[in-house]
Amino acid sequence: MVKEEPRIGVFVCHCGLNIAKTVNVKEVRDYAAKLPYVVYASDQEFTCSEAGQKTIKDAIKEHKLNRVVVASCSPKLHELTFRRCVAEAGLNPFLFEMVNIREHVSWAHMHEPEKATEKAKHLVRAAVERAALLEEIGTVSASVIPSVLVIGGGVAGIEAAIGLADYGFDVYLVERSPTLGGKAFQLGKVFPTEDCGVCTAPRNSELHRKCLYKAPILTHPKIKVYTLATIKSLEGYVGNFKATISLQPRYVNPQLCIGCGKCAEVCPVEVPNEYDVGLSKRKAIYLPSTQALPPVYTVDMANCTKCGKCVEVCPTKAINLDEQPSEVTLDVGAIVVAVGFEEYEPKGLYGFGEYSDVITQLKLSRMLDSSGPTKGEVVKPSNQRKPKKIVMVQCVGSRDKSTHIYCSKICCAIALKNARSILQKNPDTEITICYKDIRLAGKDYEHYYVDCQNMGVNFINGDVLEVKEDTETKMLKLKVKPKYGEEVELEADLVVLTCALIPAKGMEELARTLNLSLSPDGFFMELHPKLAPVDTNVDGIYICGACHGPKDIHESINQAKAVVSRVATLLAPGKVEVDLAKSIINEDLCIGCGNCVAKCPYKAIEFTPYGTARVIEIACKGCGVCVVECPARAIQLRHYKDDQIFATVSGVLKEV
């Protein structure tokens, strides 16, 4: 079969002034028109616009173009847009090439217009030479499994699980702790609605507020909950994942436990209660909280002495101290990651860990919770007395190059909500907030700031230099350097540190298991901040909630709803279709060394019965690792074959 001679059309974008202010667009267009195989060249104000795309479609038909080159912005933004455009005109979407002359040229060289224009010409020529060698690439489809794995049982994970179950998908909810609810369980009242975080977390109605045994997350027929569970391994590809779940023993049978509490009454071991951030004690066999979901006791084997007293008194024989870890394998079509966040532990900062009356906002929230360890009363941990003077220090571990450079987004609202709650109960309390900036971007958040000002909270815009305890009075002394003015000294009974929200423990390990990308801050990276905010670099895996970055309950639930929509769109058709811009192995050249099988990060290559390697096309991501590893040069990557890459390099290096 004789290949059709290339007929290339080049379309150069002004992008308003983003490109045209630096690059001489018309000069680049005229240069492109003279290149080999180019039969049409034009420039547009916005090539991605409806009018710009119509120009491309019309040119394809009028000039019988069989290759298209667009010189504009980053392919990350509009490559799919233009591929759809040429496909609608009857051209295979892979007979399209995109040149980035905005980020790589005009924005990078905005003060050198002549050199920028020359660089743009080089890149356009390279794209044209590559385009001449492009080949049509088809697609492959596979059936999908109509079930979903949700990792993380906080507000986002619960919302996603219930939403997907309501669509009719089987949902497996995996949570590493003994109870669902995440941090919302610990916060008491939450902003801006001032309702209970516990009631928000399980998506309770008024009925469920009275009877948590009827919380829909536990009773929905389409949802299976696994607590004390982690992801051990993941295999497969979009629509067909196989996840192995490690289940740690609870040592209490959930089907038999009636929550009577007799086991905890006789347990001789007491340890700090992590749910109350050390403000109370719990037994080695315990209910994680009074509102635990599921409402089942669990044994902390790290502190259990195995005395057997709990086993003896249990009326239903629900306790088995010899229970062993187990595993379960789940076949799912999509995965939702919603593992939440942790509060930064500011060891060594502002006396935290040295003075017991220096605490964090999470511990303060547990005090303010009417069902918490102090029944809603704020007390000094050192002597259980009510503090008269409280100083809050903002941005601890946030907006700091030595810890975390990012703003944790909701810290200001947390501090102001807690300050207002204190003053509503104890209006004589003197509260000072030391801050860098007050940032309240959420809907209805500003009234917290106004209320606190009206209630007499003292705001100091400055840095806290040190916190020391007076050895005689036991009062805390703070040196503060205001942004404007002289250094001042504050005295406080209680210092509350408003700490950064950081990635949850185990997130790096989970990212490796799922092959997900992390941002420089350690949170999961979205595929695109605007166009694909809940998608990831792995097809079929989505993210929502604070594992994506600091956010409040409102935003977490919104993201969870977005994920429900994305997963339903993926699974509802019953099959998934992917393009074949993947690796291809020439079995005549393959020597069966296995390098590619061992190195493939997506487990997308397997051995055939004949000892040669074969690509599982639906699983392959086209990363090219196998191409580099092959010693026999038996592997090529469609759309990035050797001759296409060499043509690109040659086109860049030639003189204009």
Image: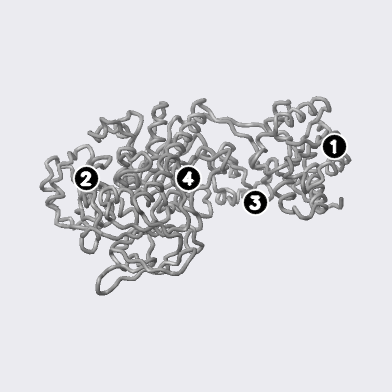
Tell me: residue 224, above or below residue 485: above
Q: Residues within 10 Å of mark 1 (few under 14, many from 20)?
A: many
Label 1, secondary structure: give it: strand
Which one is nearer the viewer's eye here, 331 or 228? 228
Asked whether, in this view, residue 529 is left or right of residue 559, the answer is right
Q: Earlier in the sequence, mark 1 or mark 3?
A: 1
Specify the amino acid type for callout 1.
Answer: Val
Residue that badge 4 annotates: 441
Q: According to the image, label 2 marks what residue? A: 297
Question: In the rendered view, does 299 fall on the left or right side of 443?
Answer: left
User: Which of the two labelled residues, at mark 3 and mark 2, occupies the earlier sequence position?
Assistant: 2
> Mark 3 belongs to which amino acid?
Cys
- Is the N terminus in the top left, top right, bottom left or bottom right quadrant? top right
Q: Position of residue 330 (x, y in %)?
A: 40, 38
Q: CA distance from mark 3 to mark 2?
A: 54 Å
Distance between the alpha carbons at the discs numbered 2 and 1? 73 Å
Can residue 405 be seen from the camera position used here? yes
Q: Earlier in the sequence, mark 2 or mark 4?
A: 2
Q: CA distance from mark 4 to mark 3?
A: 52 Å
